[in-house]
Amino acid sequence: MEPVPNGTGSALFRSGGGVAPVTIRDVAKRAGVGVGTVSRVLNDNSSVRKTTRQKVIEAIAALDYSPNPIARRLSLGKTLTIAVIVPFFTRPSFVERLRGVEYALADSEYDLILFNVETTARRDDYFHSVPRRERVDGLLIISLSPRDADVERFLQAGVPTVLVDARHPRLSRAVIDDVTGGRIATQHLIHLGHRKIGYVSDNLENPFNFVSSRDRYEGYRQALAGTDIPFRSEYHRQGEHGRKEAREMARDLLALPDPPTAIFAASDIQAIGVLEAGRDAGLNVPEDLSVIGYDDIEIAEYLHLTTIRQPLFVSGVEGVGLLLESIATPSPTPRRILLPTELVVRDTTASPG
């Protein structure tokens, strides 16, 4: 047989009158070893002698051999696939977390498959169908805190599962310190002299079991209590996530007989809606109204928005690190990585006029 270029960057070998792709047997023959030895080299088995390994590597390079991915998966007894279940993945904060996930997996042997959740029915379906050993080697769940029954199913399936921005005591997780973040945001406004501080957020109780808005609310309440500022329930507005929804909630706050002089929004997207509501009311920011967001997505810097920066990208990286560790060396003891937040002061907060 002689190599025949096929125009695709890989070599084909002529056998008789036809053209056949390079196989593992061709590599073994050229290297003068058995097929099993080539397989062990491909799987990075340390039992192969250095000189033999080098001969196999040289044969692979000379023949431009590319292992059949299906055969490789079968030989390893793995799918070489990581699944990520994420809600509303087009939202900026989720996009940034997924960037971290993709970055962390880029140099690994694993493929990434993404499952987008926009309804609770879809979430429940994925929680049932995705964690199967014949389908994935590991599962990463972003922002969707599973219930006890869900976690029991994951564990019974034997699929390593890690949470990012979600929590359950039986699973490893990379989480943000949102309580501290909410407290820092509110304390920033208090230190500027504000005493009438509103909070605009997602619904604290929700079918997806999101916890970030609730944790930031807890930090907001802690900061008020720590400075003996009475909590005023009329200063809290909660609803569906979105710029338009936040704009309406902020309009309600600003229409109160005694409106807040500052508003803490549970996300930068919601903070943009608050800024629009201030403009609608004829208020100048920050002279008449201070606004602080949360996340520090890209547009926050463009809008000069004061915000709380959370490590979105890093959380994705850390989640993958925990998952790969769980796949390589399973442990019955879950690990928890708590990621810090940071105040970023820009132009939308100032002392009350």
Image (tube, rainbow, N blue to C red):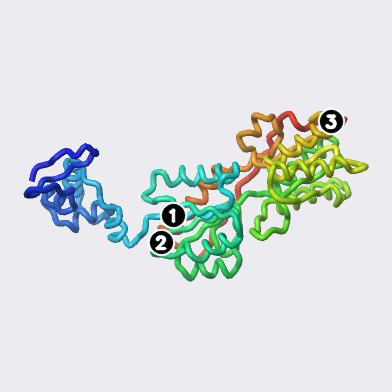
User: Which tag is nearer the camera, tag 2 or tag 3?
Assistant: 3
For label 3, the crowd category at 10 Å Cα-Cα, with few meaning under 14, some 14 to 19 and many 20 or more, is: few
| Residue beneath disc 2 | 135
Q: Say which element carries label 3.
A: loop
Residue 313: percent from left, percent from top: 55, 42
Residue 154 x %, y %: 50, 66
Instruction: Left or right? Give the position of 169 relative to 70.
Output: right
Alpha carbon of mark 3 to alpha carbon of mark 1: how far?
50 Å
Displayed quadrant of residue 3: top left
Give residue 282's mark: 3
The residue located at (77%, 48%) in the rendering is 220
Badge 2 crowding class, 10 Å Cα cut-off, few under 14, some 14 to 19, many 20 or more, is some
Q: CA distance from mark 2 to mark 3?
A: 56 Å
Q: Nearer the viewer, mark 3 or mark 1?
A: 3
Name the residue carrying label 1.
Answer: 82
Of pointers 2 and 1, the one earlier in the residue sequence: 1
Residue 145 as seen in the image, left or right of residue 106? right
Tell me the element at label 1. Answer: strand
Q: Earlier in the sequence, mark 2 or mark 3?
A: 2
Q: Nearer the viewer, mark 2 or mark 1?
A: 2
Q: Secondary structure at mark 2?
A: loop
Of all residues, the one furthest to the front in this rendering is 17
x then y, percent, for residue 244: 72, 42
